[in-house]
Image (cartoon, rainbow, N blue to C red):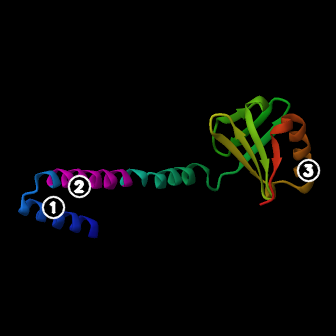
Amino acid sequence: MLGVAGAIYFGFQLYRHGFQIATAGYLIVCSLMILVAVSSRRRSGADDTLKKYRKYYENHRATFRIDADGVDMKLEGQKNHAHSKFRQIYGLFETERCFYFVIKGKAYYILPKKALSPEDADALRTYMQQQCKKKFQFYAL
């Protein structure tokens, strides 16, 4: 708000003293300020993404199935499921809390380790090391 008030005052002074070149510069600066204000409102759409995520995914159980065909994920209450073949997996990362399956095309699955027994986590790790070879990495975070 202070920037707008300063721009108005500065513009009035330029207009009063009749500086034509400075007036053109002032108009350009004001136009840029308006563009910044408008574009910053559009960026707030990230909140809409979070709302959509919560609506469709929060408090819904996901079922993962990993076999020779690849990785399947089905969300509770939905008819469709997501399937990715192992060759489509761009990277597989393990942290202390999760397994991350990064799929080509900017998609990913996150499988929390707390959803698995320690034996299942070990079996998954071994299986994915065999299937994805160099794509599998562990990060201690």
Q: Mark 3 points at which residue?
A: 122
Q: Mark 1 points at which residue?
A: 11
Identity, as a three-letter code, of the amino acid under mark 3:
Asp
Secondary structure category for the residue under label 3? helix
Query: Is the N terminus in the top left, top right, bottom left or bottom right quadrant?
Result: bottom left
Q: Do the residues labelled 1 and 2 touch (CB within 8 Å)?
A: yes
How far apart, in angstroms, are the residues tagged by discs 3 and 1? Answer: 68 Å
- Relative to residue 8, is residue 113 depicted above or below? above
Dominant secondary-structure state across the stretch colored magenta: helix
Using the numbered discs, state the Cα–Cα distance from disc 1 to disc 2 in whole angstroms.
Answer: 9 Å
Q: Where is residue 101 in the image (x, y as percent from the top left)?
A: 74, 43
Magenta part of the protein: which range? 23-40
Observer-nearest residue: 47 or 74?
A: 47
**Quick check: is 9 in the magenta stretch?**
no
Q: How many marks?
A: 3
The C terminus lies in quadrant: bottom right
Q: Which residue is drawn at 32% across and 56% down?
A: 37
Residue tagged by mark 2? Answer: 30
Q: Mark 1 belongs to which amino acid? A: Gly
In this orientation, does residue 1 appear?
A: no
